[in-house]
Image: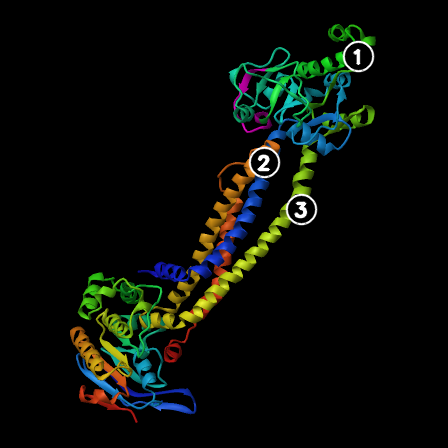
Amino acid sequence: MNLFRISWSNLIARPLSVMMSLLLLALGVSIISLLLLVNERLEQNFNQNIKGIDMVVGAKGSPLQLILASVYHIDNPTGNIPLHEAEQLAQHPLVEKAIPMAYGDNYQGYRILGTDSQYVAHYEGNLIEGRLWNAKFEVVLGAAVAKRLGLDMGQTFLGAHGLTDAKNVHDEHPYTVVGILQANGSVIDQLILTGVESVWGIHEEHEEKSSPTPTEETHEEEDHDHEEHADESEEGKEITALLIKFRTPMGMVMLPRMINEETSMQAALPAIEINKLLYKLLPIAINTGQGIAIAIMIISAISVFISLYNNLKDRKYELALMRTMGASRWQLFFIVVMEGLLLALIGAILGLLASRLGLLLLNNMVIDAYHYDFSGWVLLTSEWWLALATMGIGFLAAAFPGIQAFGLNISETLAEG
Amino acid sequence: MLVSRNLTFSYTPSVAFQFPDIHCEAGQSLLVLGNSGKGKTTLLHLLAGLLRPNTGSIHIGEVDLANLGEKELDRFRGRNIGIVFQQSHFVDALNVMDNLLLGQYLAGVPQNKSRAQSLLAHLGVEERTHHKAWKLSVGEAQRVAIARAVMNQPKVLLADEPTSALDDQSTEKVIDLLEEQARQANASLIIVTHDQRLKDRIFDQVIMQ
């Protein structure tokens, strides 16, 4: 027998009102915690994938869209840019690294990205099987793609035109899996990688069918020698975007302006666009959610208060009785406050569990829709604070009934029966 | 042993009580008789240290209750004073055994399950040990209340109208139990009542005017 046991017994003696308080508390906690978790994951994902990319160059349009499409692969690209302009830029002395990206096809919703080996190196992709592509229509699978689609080494599949559509299948050129990457939590897990030539190859075929120009392939090899032909021969050659790392910070000052003013391309800075997204747009949504959750928390605090207060009225005699048995005023105070704290603690634990469950559900949803992975069971620092704040709410809600128990007039209460 | 002298108490200036002196040796039984409105319950609360008198003194053993602070008084009460109320109340959320152990816990003495068990057996309610307190019948509840009052071997056992709602036969039984338990704990038994039937059972009497 101890104070904890008395409080606990009192709680389980009235399951309905306790359940109501717990539900409200858990609801409030889970909503706040879910928002914190999603926020944290988004920030982490966004910042991880942005690493080492100073600038993205693509077609003119929304800079945020360009970043979302080329860095995170969750939006459609703004369009294509001419290869020769991109190559010119890649040669610029302020550019240390320029990774080409060419979109075109998808396989069951997973994007097939034409790029070069720098891309794999940039995201620190390690092959667990096979090798990188070195011929047209050879592909390397991201870990999540391999797992979800059940594709294995040597298997072939047909890409569909566009980024999501599965109707328009290129049945002439099957892709062959030559390598599979290890999972590393970056966007690379969710992609099918191939050479830029594969993406061109598929679409050349289409052009050849409609208007055959058989010289195109030979010109391609010689474009540096025959400057005057370059424009002509590469007219059809486009890529979607370039990921650029500057050689010096000067690049940040010079290049974006130059590109935006002097070329048909657009330069977008991921750090700035993502800051806009994470710290201006997202907080609006998150604050709204938090407002609702805080309202629920306040209601649950009131519910805990009412539950304890009503119960106290019924239990006045019991509390006076405990005083006759030797309990001090403080012990009565603790018994009542402990009930509030226990409610808050259980509510917080239930809420945190529920938010993880919610995240798991959300994760399954998001994986299908965006190929983004949200899973994980870590308790965030902010969630410790949330649990602590919930305990604080429990304490506050119990404090007034506790004070009443403290100041209880034993003689009067006992005389009233 | 309990000794009180010149006790007075008033709830409001117009309602003032003056109480007869009380002297009850260890092992002795004392009946305090008085009609309704004479302040019987008030006197019992004063003796139990639940109220502080305006004037006068109460000694239990060597201890003057007036010298005890609030917390010391709570502790002293838990260890040395057992009270049986007119109606038996318990902590409803706890079972019978836990209600008995509660008294030991709150008084800060070691919890003794076997004492609780043997008391319940002796009072004939051992099969109720693990029942919730609110499920007891009136008779059972009174027995458990007596067991609770003597759990800590108190120096003083106070009973407030323990028999007023009982028939003659049950009254006999309850007084037997109270006297027996008080004797076993070597406690001073003080019964405050208007029940005239007890006059012929307990011969040491104080009449409240």
Could you tell me how many numbered marks the image carries?
3
Secondary structure at numbered mark 3: helix
Quadrant containing the C terminus of chain A in the rendered view: bottom left
Q: Residue at x 22, y 88 (%)?
A: B197
Q: Nearer the viewer, mark 1 or mark 3?
A: 1
Question: Which segment did they paint magenta?
Answer: A176-189
Q: Earlier in the sequence, mark 1 or mark 2?
A: 1
Whichever of labels 3 and 2 marks the residue nearer the N terminus, that label is 3
Q: Are marks 3 and 2 on the same chain?
A: yes
Report in which chain the residue with disc 3 lies.
Answer: A
Q: Is residue A272 covered in magenta? A: no
Quadrant location, the N terminus of chain A: bottom left
Q: Nearer the viewer, residue B156 or A183?
A: A183
- Rate crowding at label 2 as few (under 14), some (14 to 19) or many (20 or more) other CA atoms within 10 Å: some
Near-viewer residue (A232 or A163): A163
Inter-mark Cα distance, 1 to 3: 51 Å
- In the structure shown, which secondary structural element does the residue marked by tag 1 occupy? loop
Query: Residue A353: x, y in percent?
Result: 48, 45
User: The numbered mark 1 sits on a residue in which chain?
Assistant: A
Q: Quadrant of residue B201?
A: bottom left
**Pointer 2: what residue?**
A366
Q: Is residue A380 visible?
A: no
The image shows residue A162 at horizontal and vertical percentages of 69, 24
Residue for badge 3: A284
Hey, what amino acid is under mark 2? Val
Q: CA distance from mark 3 to mark 2?
A: 21 Å
Parent chain of label 2? A
What residue did someone put label 1 on? A211
Residue A191 sits above or below residue B96 on the image: above
State how far apart marks 1 and 2 are (Cα): 42 Å
Label 2's element?
helix
x%, y% of residue A199?
A: 68, 17
